[in-house]
Amino acid sequence: MKQPQFNRTLRQLVMLPIVLLVLLAGFLVWQIAATTSAQRALDHSDQVTAQLQELQNLFIDQETGLRGFQLTGDPVMLDPWKAAVGPIQAHFTALRGMLGGDPDQLKTLDDLEVRYNQWLGFANAVLHQDTAALNAAGINQRGKALMDALRSSAARMVLHEEDLRAVRSQHARWLLGRELISLMVSAGVVGIFLALFTRHHVHAISQSYQRRIDEITKSSGELFESQQWFKTTLESIGDAVIACDHRGAVSFMNAVAEKLTGWPPAEARGKPLAKVFHIINEQTRKPCENPVDKVRRLKKVVGLANHTLLIDRAGSEYVIDDSAAPIMSGTGKMIGVVLVFRDVTEERRVQTALVASEKLAVAGRLAASIAHEIHNPLDSVANLHFLLAQENDPAKREEYLRLAQQELGRTMQISRTMLSLYREPRAPIQIDLRELIEGVLLLLDRRLQHQGIRMETKIAGDLAVEGFPAELRQVFTNLIVNAIEASGAKGKVRITMEHAESAEMHGAGAAIEIADSGPGIDPEAAKRLFQPFFTTKGADGTGLGLWVSMGIVQKHGGSISIVERADPELPGACIRVFLPARTMAQQAGVTAAD
Amino acid sequence: MPISTILCIDDEALGLQIRKAVLERAGYQVLTAVDGPTGLSLFRGNPIDGVVLDYYMPEMDGGVVAETMRRERPEIPIMLLSAYINLPTEVVELADVTVLKGEGPQELLDKLRAMLFAPGADGRPATGDVP
């Protein structure tokens, strides 16, 4: 049952009985009014009868007074006669008013009045006669006849009124009976109707209530199940999970989090996160910003800064990688923060080892090329020495010595270049990028010639960046060698370097693009290009070159990416490297792409 | 003993001239070429007794040159001279002798003589059949 329907039912349950009871009361009032009216008619009959009775008594008083005067001739005897005159008239008037609605009784009343007046005429005549004649036999006979007629009329009226009263009394009794039956029937009907109506509605409400209870029981069961489901999932995953309430107090942590922080969940619950999850910067060893505060400030998912160390309760340190996310309620209010992190100490060690192994591979390749570069002039020097030993002609000896000196000079130049390659400063220094890239090209010159590569350089002068030259040389050697290998024999490589304005994500610096005429990189491979162990060179590549290059560029605060350049002469890959003029790199050393 | 003619191919012009002087002093007649194609045309147009071939050269490397020579005149012995240690096996197998640059002129001359006058050489590879 929906809320509006429920409200309607409740309204009906209250309003219907009120309306029915009002109707019932109205009906009863009507019934009572009818009975009362019948009772009034009955009273009216009684009053008419009483008036008639009094009128008859007054007639008797007058007759008695007249008779007394006849007998005694004493005028005092006439006092009752005189006293009755006024009231008789008043009674006639009153009766005329009362019998307005009954023409039969009015006619009889008129008749009565006529007869009274006849009698009164007779009485007046008697009063004015001589005293002697007062008791004449004839007079008394006539008076008696008149009075009898008068009495007969009055008796007729009384009889008529009594008949009327009997009818009215019967009607009143019938009305009273009807009233009682109506009361009982209507009360019974209304009662039964209300009982049925209320029962139906209360039943509906009760059923709906029961259904709601069933639903709530079911959904709370499901809720419990899903809670168990999520809890077990969180408990079982390999990453550490800590959930906090909106104030940043720990509300849940899984087994991995317990292992890494050293805090049992029961003890950690309710404690501020910073106490349980103690993190510092790996290099500065200063406390890091509490991730919960950061999420509460930014209201979005945040990742931890690189080089974060977690210190557990016992003081052991773990390199961790983590992220924190806000937990939002349905109304968009932040109700908590969840923190997911994992121990990457081992991963970091492996990365370091990989970077070192790539460095060794680079050194190995470099050593082979050094050997080749040095062996050529050394071979010539050995040959010249052989010739010198057998030559006596001073001019020829002079020529051989000059050549030997020239070849030795070449050998020393090569060895100097190699040395500078591995002499790395401790702190970043100003590097002339043009000089650095030209140095790399010089080292690769033989290879370029061997493959007949056309190398085109468009390098803006005087572009300097801060950084570590040997590392950047490794990056550009990697990128240029890749371009040469992709281009194949008689290919073309173009290196462009220009000033890059400061933008939203970085400050001003240098942008270097290396484009080749090779087959290009297919989109699938492009996605994985900067991942370790990904190579398109089969057994010849370690798959670490670009990964290490990206790490170095990122350490310098720069970026490296594949870009699209529609140049028909250079349809292959184009790699863009951005290096900021002011580096963020703090110290020399291996860094992998995180 | 007639004077042997040696074809020397190397992209290092200076080193090539010095090597030529060494070989001439040892009594050989020497033809030189600074790249593979030039070397091959000399190889085709001249009576050659042996080839001293550099491996690492632009455009056409020693492997391709040696393969072409073997196909055209398999009897001419080839010495592969290189500063590389890790030469491809199939290229090493094409040559009669492999000499590392920097081993010194005496070694070069000894090995060249051995290659040219080895039993069964004379017009055939040293590894060929021995009567």
Image (cartoon, rainbow, N blue to C red):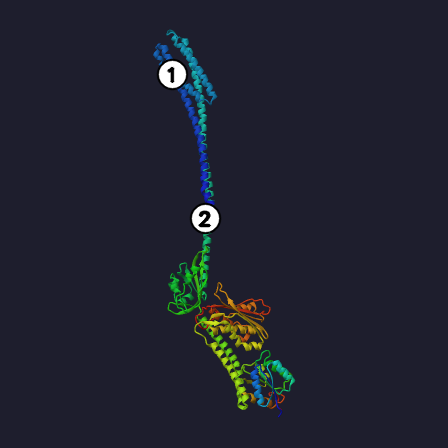
Between B128 and B27, the residue placed more toward the observer is B27
Do discs 2 and 1 share a chain?
Answer: yes
Cα gap from disc 2 to disc 1, whole angstroms: 82 Å
**Few, some or many residues within 10 Å of mark 1 (<14, 14–19, 20+):** some
Read off the residue under disc 1.
A84
Q: Quadrant of residue A452?
A: bottom right
Ranked by sequence position, the earlier of labels 2 and 1 is 1
Which numbered marker is on residue A383? none
Residue A130 rendering spot, x and y as whole percentages: 38, 7
Residue A575 rendering spot, x and y as whole percentages: 53, 69
Residue A171 rendering spot, x and y as whole percentages: 46, 28
Please, which residue is most extreme toward the front here? A395
- Could you tell me which secondary element the residue under label 2 belongs to? helix
Please, which residue is most extreme toward the right here? B45
Chain for numbered disc 2: A
Q: Is residue A282 above or below residue B58?
A: above
Between A45 and A277, the residue placed more toward the observer is A277
- Could you tell me which secondary element the residue under label 1 belongs to? helix
Badge 2 vs badge 1, beta-carbon distance below 8 Å: no
Look at label 2 and name its amino acid.
Answer: Ser
Residue A431 rendering spot, x and y as whole percentages: 47, 72
Read off the residue under disc 2.
A206
Between A404 and B44, the residue placed more toward the observer is A404
Residue A342 appears in the figure: no
Q: Is residue A266 left or right of residue A530?
A: left
Q: Quadrant of residue A255?
A: bottom left
Residue B33 appears in the figure: yes
Look at label 1 and name its amino acid.
Answer: Ala
**Few, some or many residues within 10 Å of mark 2 (<14, 14–19, 20+):** few
Q: Is residue A273 left or right of residue A421?
A: left
